């Protein structure tokens, strides 16, 4: 099997993933997963597609993350890994879609409007 690459996005985060056959090592920006995401919850989010398919120790993953916060980056990485796994084995797509790993979460930050302190918040109204 050659290198399979895929891209995932969430909020302002972009994840590029390169999947190869190996022993289950995940490397993000030349750092191990446990160093890049110290939180066990975020590590679990990243590994979800592989744990669902039972291929956690079958593939090595190298990823480049850009933009966003740590939670958005973890979810972008999850989407990219799911897309790469589907490129390897298209029969897995239905199982991943059922769990919601193939859907790009389209929610973005709403822009701030002029004359307001935030996107929806208003300054206090005074009648007199």
Image: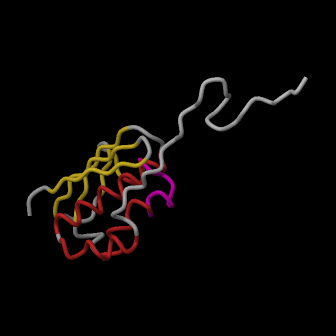
Q: In which quadrant will I find the C terminus? A: top right
The vertical placement of 35 against 59, above or below, is above
Q: How is the image coloured?
A: secondary structure
| Residue 100 colored in magenta in the image | no
Res 64 → quadrant = top left
Q: Is residue 110 left or right of residue 58?
A: right
Q: Please tell me which residue is depicted at 41% across the width and 49% down the height of the picture.
A: 10
Q: Residue at x 16, y 66 (%)?
A: 88
Q: Residue at x 32, y 51 (%)?
A: 8
* Magenta residue span: 36-44
User: Which image quarter holds the N terminus?
Assistant: bottom left
Label tally: 0
The foreground one among 121 and 17 is 121
Residue 122 versus residue 63 in the image, above or below: above
Q: Main secondary structure of the magenta part?
A: helix
In the image, is residue 43 part of the stretch drawn in magenta? yes
Q: Position of residue 121 (x, y in %)?
A: 69, 36
Relative placement, left or right, of 84 versus 101 is: left
- Location of residue 35 in the rendering, given as x and y in whole percent from the top left corner: 42, 49
6 versus 115 height, above or below: below
- In depth, the one of 64 and 34 nearer the eye is 64
Measured from the top left, where is residue 7 in percent x and y?
26, 50
Q: Who is closer to the viewer here, 68 or 25?
A: 68
Hey, which residue is sitting farthest right in the picture? 128
Q: Residue furthest front?
A: 127
């Amino acid at each position: 099997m050659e290198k399979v690459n895929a891209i995932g996005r969430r909020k302002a985060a972009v994840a590029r993933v390169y999947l190869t056959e190996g022993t289950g090592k995940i490397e993000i920006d030349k750092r191990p997963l446990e160093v890049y995401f110290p939180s066990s919850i975020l590590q679990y989010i990243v590994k979800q597609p592989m744990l669902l398919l039972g291929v956690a120790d079958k593939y090595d993953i190298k990823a480049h993350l850009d933009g966003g916060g740590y939670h958005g980056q973890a979810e972008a990485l999850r989407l990219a890994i799911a897309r790469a796994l589907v490129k390897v084995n298209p029969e897995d797509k239905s199982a991943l879609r059922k769990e919601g790993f193939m859907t790009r979460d389209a929610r973005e930050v709403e822009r701030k409007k002029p004359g307001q302190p935030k996107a929806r918040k208003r300054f206090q109204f005074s009648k007199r």
